[in-house]
Amino acid sequence: MPVEIEHGCARATEQLVPIACKISSISEETSDVKAFRVQTLEGEKPFDCEPGQTAMLSVIPYGECMFCVSAQGEDYVEFTIKKVGYVTTQLHDLSVGDVVGLRGPYGNWFPADGLRGKDLLFVGGGIGLAPLRSLLTYVLAHRSDYGRVDLVYSGSTIDDLVFLSDIQGAWTEYPDTHMHVSVYKECKGWDGEVSFTAPFLEKLAFSPEGRIAILCGGPSLFRTCLESLEKMGFPPEDIITTLEMKMKCGIGKCGRCNVGSLYICLDGPVFTMAELADLPWSAD
Amino acid sequence: MLLAKNRLLELLEHLSTQARVYVPARLEVASLAGESTDSGTLSHFVQYAAGVQPDFELVNTTLPPKDMLFPQTQKMYRYGFDTDGVPYIDPIHDADEVVVFGLRSCDMASIDCMDQVFLTKGYEDEFYAPRRQKLLCVALACGQAAESCFCDSMGIDPNVAANADIQLVAGDEAFSLSAQTEKGQAALSQWQAFLSAGELPVAPAPTSCSLKVEANGLKDKLEQMYEHPLWEQISKKCLTCGTCTFVCPTCHCFDISQSNRMQMGERFRSWDSCMFFDYTEMAGHHNPRAAKMPRVRQRFMHKLCFFEERYGCSLCVGCGRCVAQCPVALDITVLIDQIGAAPLDEKQDVEGAVHAG
């Protein structure tokens, strides 16, 4: 039975108008990636969401951007944000206690229920671990419901690896949970694997039997790892990914994030490769 | 029911006391130097007030009526910090009662399309919905079609605007009025003082468009043409100026941005265009539609294929505004013909050509 993914999920409590929230903690993951925990001004969790869902976070006078919720707790949602543009630069200047706007959660989610009993292969690069983290932490919190868990994760250098303390620490302590990390080029402080993601993935030679791959990364990682997974025998319905696109509304109205007749913000961002095969979409 | 033409302004005057009333009219366009230029070449649905001369002969107004429901710039909320330093985010909901008088069938069909976008698929847009609820649509049958009109090829009847609240038909001395919805019925009963019983003595001959396209099967054909060389060919002359999207009554894409003064500001949405480079440009400069061809393809695929796949109807209503206004004559009716005539086996050739090039 292929894993079923829901689409067209309209669950946001706020549509276009955010609520005022505050930053409750900030952790510096790399020189240009920070993880922000956000809660309401009263100190509560802003909304409940499923692993893989997204939300629109705003630095109020500067603008808003769509991010995946990379983790959540009793009283917060977390966003892992790389400093790449105008709004993210403003975000990186914020301190604990500062006010942000938040609306969501938008879109669909990873089929955490449908994946129960399966072996899971997470494949990601750089900041692409952020959306995977939401599912990975969920799976680890319900560890006995899932089979073997593998994470194949890479970055250009050691400074591009986010959540390294979890990867080398907390996550390895779960049973049958295996972390495989590589960097693209030799660098100081790294004595592990040096390899691009796709060849590393092929070297690890995962069997597609009873296993689902969850893939997230930039265009070239995506394209090459997809080829590797196909070579290893993963059928497209067993490869799950989450897409990104410029977004403004989050509710399927403003137009820009379409792939064919679907909107990534509302019908996605999570798709199987089998679903994408029917859409006018390419990894570029 | 009949409305004598010489009582029309009286009715509009009366309605203006209860609602904002929009009528088709020519705009005076002032040049930067201040003198009036181009008088009469640009037309729009404008708010009726003393001095506004409605022109019910206009087919079609240069600018579409969509801004009544979906303003070109719409403030959504104010934000800032109050005197105690507490942050606030206050939505701006400002829908008034609006009567639009003299919509054409294509305009009405465009509102049906906008209703699909803004009111379905799980989210009722909180800024569109109240405006739509408070809008009374009074449509006017087209006495004649413009050169660029092709609505009847797109399944729209220029003589009857399906879903309008009230349908007008212009006779020599009077308009006939018929209510097509409960809302229209209620309006007509309030307008009794201006109306008289009866029918037009001579019913005008039905109008049809002389410009024809074959739209049947368009979606199915386009579903097989995403990679077709036609897109590269037709996009060559496009300037990506966005005129087509701004004059289109169904184009509904928007941007969200803000204006700030000190510690307070407003976030608003405004019309955007899929023809623009930065429409899909992300932080880090990744842009899936950086080139012109994918943008041109997106616009026409959305109009003629994707929208129908999603909502069951075409996003082109055949009003001809883009045909009339495109500065390089990139004509959607010509494109529709080209799509119809395009052989489907050219895909291989293109890929070869792209690699070779």
Image (cartoon, grey):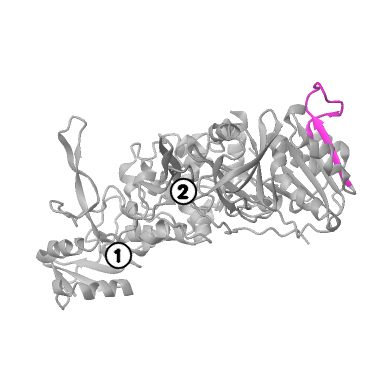
Amino acid at the residue labelled 1? Leu
Q: Which mark is residue B136?
A: 1
Q: Earlier in the sequence, mark 2 or mark 1?
A: 2
Q: Is residue A211 left or right of residue B273?
A: right
Residue B255 coordinates in the image, percent (x, y): 45, 43
Q: Quadrant of the C terminus of chain B?
A: top right
Most foreground residue, A173 or B139? A173
- Is B355 placed above or below A111 here? above
Determine the CA span between mark 2 and mark 1: 31 Å
Most foreground residue, A57 or B222? A57
Number of residue marks: 2
Residue A102 coordinates in the image, percent (x, y): 55, 47
The residue that disc 2 covers is B89
Protein chain holding label 1? B
**Which element type, helix, strand or loop, lies under badge 2?**
strand
Answer whether residue B205 is visible to the viewer in this image: no
Protein chain holding label 2? B
Residue A258 coordinates in the image, percent (x, y): 55, 48
Q: Quadrant of the N terminus of chain B?
A: bottom left
Identify the magenta region.
Answer: A177-197
Q: Is residue A120 left or right of residue A277?
A: right
Q: Quadrant of residue A166?
A: top right
Q: Which mark is residue A119?
A: none
Residue positioned most to the right: A176
- Is B249 placed above or below B260 here? below
Label 2 vs label 1, nearer the camera: 2
Residue displayed at 47% across by 60% down = B124
Amino acid at the residue labelled 2? Ile
